[in-house]
Image (cartoon, rainbow, N blue to C red):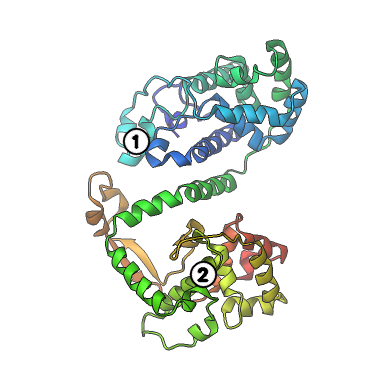
Amino acid sequence: MGFLSDRDSSEQNFTGMNPSLVQFLLVTQQETALRNAHLGLDALENQMMGSVDIVLGLFQHQHEMTDRWCGALSVDQEKILELLNSVGDTNEPAPEPNAFSAEAAELDPGAKRMLQNNRVVSSVVRDALKRIKHHGKQTGTQPKIGDLAVALLEGEGEVRDTVLQVVSPDELERSLSVLKETPEKPVDFMAATMSNMRGLLDKMWPKLQEEALSNRPELARAQAVKDELYEQDPSRYEERLPLSDAYSRELPEGKEFLALTGLCLHAAGNEARIRKAPFVTLDHMIAALLQPGTHTFDFLESRGIDPESWYKQLDKRLARQESGPRWPENSRDLTMNLPSDQKMETTRPISEIDFDNLPREEILKFYQSKPTGEEFSDLHFLKAVLNEPQTLSHGLLTSAGLTASDF
């Protein structure tokens, strides 16, 4: 991010740091945004990572280090975490604005905006990073995660003030050697990033959906049609949809893929409505597919798995509400895993499209849809579960030993 990308000052160029520390900082920055996702996209663009956020990241990713440190402080770990979480958005001062090199000026607008964001980290964090890098140059070593934690706890910042609420300065000083001496554990950057991205989208999804739907008046007409169909036969929407019957119907030629995807969404929507759920989730989709006549049912039986048993487990664990919307919106995990027999391509290179200054309608003109030739299979949803570890269905698949190669 900004503090890792600055190229015009050797003092601010931290790219020579220990890769584990760099990945730790990037993941911690993501988690700072995740904690503040309720503020909305505009607020997140100005989100600044402070000293407390760094030490919260330590508790998240360096368990041995924080266990030993709290032991040295003789303070319960939960108490420290409670105090750190109570701080919320940092009030530490922002650093001075960055200057930019000619190289930065040639970047595309999106990358340039990222570099220009001088609020990526607080001045307290940036000063600590400068100090540990300077010390690393003097000693011929690369600064580590524990070194950054010590620099923050020794300096003037919110994390030191917070910890000093429960320990004395002398007790804190004596505990710091543990942070330096405990071997750091490399952060699984890709796994953490994917998890944080999913978490961020999940938290922001209701607001994103609300904004997207408010800008599409044609959806109101579609809603009126759905309401009319519902009134004609409520059972078609409030009971489990038999997909074996639906799959056997004659479908519009050339629209089979789209029609079958729509039938599955209808069935998943019914599972959500039966439980008065606010959103239709990937778990609702899997519950809908665990019935005879689906590709998912046949696949599981071929692997010696009882689909009916899986349905009973899901049915028991899926939350039931006292009330819910007639037309629950699709959740993030379902929306991002919808199959398609079309792929979008741009008619010109991405670098030539002015995303910042062109209206959405003009940008869409640079995209075109092309058929992939794929045939529909509801197994797509079952395979998608492997990429969504927060789902109930994920536990069913992993306990059965199913992996991506099985699909």
Depth order, front residue of 173/216? 216
Residue 183 seen in the figure: no
Q: Position of residue 187 (x, y in %)?
A: 62, 40
In the picture, measured across the screen, residue 177 lies left or right of residue 334, that is right
Q: Name the residue tied to disc 1.
A: 113
Q: Name the residue tied to disc 2.
A: 268
- The local secondary structure at tag 2 comes to helix
Q: How many marks?
A: 2
Q: Position of residue 93 (x, y in %)?
A: 45, 19
Residue at 53 percent across and 63 percent down: it is 276
Q: Position of residue 344 (x, y in %)?
A: 35, 63
In the picture, measured across the screen, residue 1 lies left or right of residue 153, that is left
Identify whether 241 is placed above or below 362: below
Residue projecting furthest to the top: 170
Of callouts 1 and 2, which one flags the residue occurring earlier in the amino acid sequence?
A: 1
In the picture, measured across the screen, residue 366 lies left or right of residue 294, that is left
Q: From mark 1 to mark 2, how far is it between C-alphas?
A: 41 Å
Residue at 67 percent across and 60 percent down: it is 395
Depth order, front residue of 225/391? 225
Under mark 2, the amino acid is Ala
Residue 292 seen in the figure: yes
Identify whether 231 is placed above or below 107: below
